[in-house]
Image: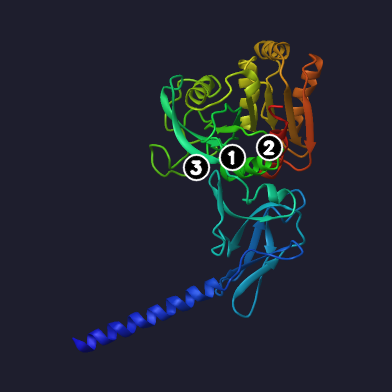
């Protein structure tokens, strides 16, 4: 028995030493490393791998991810890649190890976009500073549930309240911020950096303190996958319906407004409401604002999936929205976006009926890099 005990103790000691050695090796791998010249060095300890490449949206000028940028293995079995000098921005990446895409095990900062996960890093100094957590007063973020009689279910919503809201008696304006296809009520917070953008803009005096309400725009979904009944299913672009919708998301939007105005200290007037969204959410913002043509003084369409301009009801509702008046109708789109022409066609019709709008054209395409920029430019124009 004593001999067996000694053998087991020796094995445990050997395993412990091996584990500590492995952990120590991993701890020595620094990745990502932001260099003084704003390049980034990525590293992966994979001594048995035959080929490792990096895929990231910083590898091409237009932000299109590529997967064939090879990393080089050093004598210690650590694969390494150093990028060109990067402009200030938030970037994402993955490693591809012998054909298998993985996240960087040395980087704990991970985001999900629909069913894909990737690491992120930020190059500071300009735009990246707006997306970073800085030493400024911070707002609060609540994930809560509201009743939607129109959709006949309870639904989850994310609400940002600005710093000082809890101690104030003031009423605040509200921005309703809508996600794109495949997204949910978490998308604008994780991928869009909404709380960081608003915290920083408000602290700098560039934006008014406001609530930001981020809904789930999938009428057949009560909440993000894993947060609703139905279990931890794989997300999809179709929104993983877990209920049979009784109406469209646009038709149910009055339920969202009623919940917010019944539970938060907000301005319950047109001048205190804004609505904006990206892609599908831009289409929702377009439809909601014209369906409720005297409800929002501020509308933002980011790479919007909007249109249907041959429809007489759509035409009449846009004219009613024009006649009721508003303070800002802001349209933004990248010139390589697949929805670029649709936005040009929409604006051509608006010109024909003298519908006032402001257009902001950027480079690049249908990517979060653009939508974060649009939010950081749109928010300072609100509630003036």
Quarter of the picture holding the C terminus: top right
Residue pictured at 76% horizontal, 62% vertical:
84
**Residue 180 in the figure: left or right of residue 15:** right
Residue 137 location (% of width, % of height): 60, 45
Q: Is residue 305 above or below residue 81?
A: above
C-alpha separation, residue under disc 1 versus residue under disc 2: 10 Å
Tell which of 170 and 141 is nearer to you. Answer: 170
Residue 374 in view of the camera: yes
Which residue carries the number 2 mark? 375
Circles 2 and 3: CB atoms closer than 8 Å: no
What residue appears at the point 61 percent right and 16 percent down from the top-left corner? Answer: 291
Residue at the far bottom in the pictured view: 3
Q: Are marks 1 and 2 in contact (CB under 8 Å)?
A: yes
Instruction: Please provide percent x and percent y for residue 7.
Output: 28, 86
Q: Give the spatial CA distance, label 3 vs label 1.
A: 16 Å
Q: Which residue is mark 1?
A: 188
State the mark number for residue 235: 3
Query: Residue 48 sits in which quadrant?
Result: bottom right
**Could you say which quadrant of the image residue 271 lies in?**
top right
116 lies above or below 175? below
| Helix, strand or loop status at disc 3 | loop
Q: Give the mark nearest the N terminus, 3 or 1.
A: 1
Q: CA distance from mark 2 to mark 3?
A: 25 Å
Of all residues, the one furthest to the left in this rendering is 1
Q: Percent from the top left, x then y, of residue 358?
A: 78, 27
User: In the picture shown, does residue 60 fall above or below 24?
Assistant: above
Q: Answer left or right for 236 relative to 60.
A: left
Locate the N terminus by quadrant: bottom left
């Amino acid at each position: 028995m004593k001999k067996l005990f000694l053998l087991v103790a020796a094995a445990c000691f050997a395993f412990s030493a091996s584990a500590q050695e492995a952990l120590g090796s991993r701890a020595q791998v620094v990745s990502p490393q932001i260099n003084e010249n704003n390049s980034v060095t990525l590293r992966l300890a994979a001594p048995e791998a035959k080929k490792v490449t990096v895929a990231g949206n910083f590898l091409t000028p237009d932000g299109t991810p590529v997967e064939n940028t090879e990393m080089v293995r050093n004598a210690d079995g650590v694969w390494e890649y150093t990028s060109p000098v990067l402009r200030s921005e938030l970037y994402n990446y993955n490693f591809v190890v012998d054909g298998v895409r993985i996240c960087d095990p040395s980087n704990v900062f991970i985001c999900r976009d629909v069913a894909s996960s990737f690491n992120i890093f930020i190059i500071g100094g300009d735009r990246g500073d707006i997306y970073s957590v800085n030493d400024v007063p911070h707002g609060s973020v609540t994930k809560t549930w509201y009743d939607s009689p129109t959709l006949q279910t309870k639904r989850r919503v994310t609400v940002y309240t600005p710093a000082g809201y809890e101690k104030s008696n003031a009423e605040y304006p509200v921005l309703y911020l809508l996600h794109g296809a495949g997204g949910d009520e978490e998308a604008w917070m994780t991928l869009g950096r909404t709380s960081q953008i608003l915290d920083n803009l408000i602290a700098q005096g560039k934006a008014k303190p406001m609530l930001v309400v981020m809904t789930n725009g999938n009428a057949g979904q009560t909440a993000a996958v894993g947060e609703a009944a139905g279990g931890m299913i794989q997300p999809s672009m179709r929104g993983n319906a877990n209920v049979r919708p009784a109406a469209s998301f646009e038709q149910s939007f009055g339920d969202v407004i009623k919940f917010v105005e019944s539970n938060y200290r907000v301005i319950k007037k047109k001048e205190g409401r804004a609505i904006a969204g990206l892609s599908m959410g831009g289409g929702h913002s377009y439809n909601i604002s014209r369906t409720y043509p005297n409800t929002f003084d501020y509308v933002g369409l980011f790479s919007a999936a909007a249109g249907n301009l041959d429809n007489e009801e759509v035409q009449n509702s846009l004219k009613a929205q024009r006649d009721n008046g508003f303070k800002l109708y802001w349209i933004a789109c990248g010139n390589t976006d697949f929805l670029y022409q649709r936005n040009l066609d929409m604006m051509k019709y608006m010109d024909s009926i003298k519908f006032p709008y402001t257009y902001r054209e950027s480079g690049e395409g249908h990517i979060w890099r653009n939508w974060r920029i649009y939010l950081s430019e749109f928010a300072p124009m609100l509630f003036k």
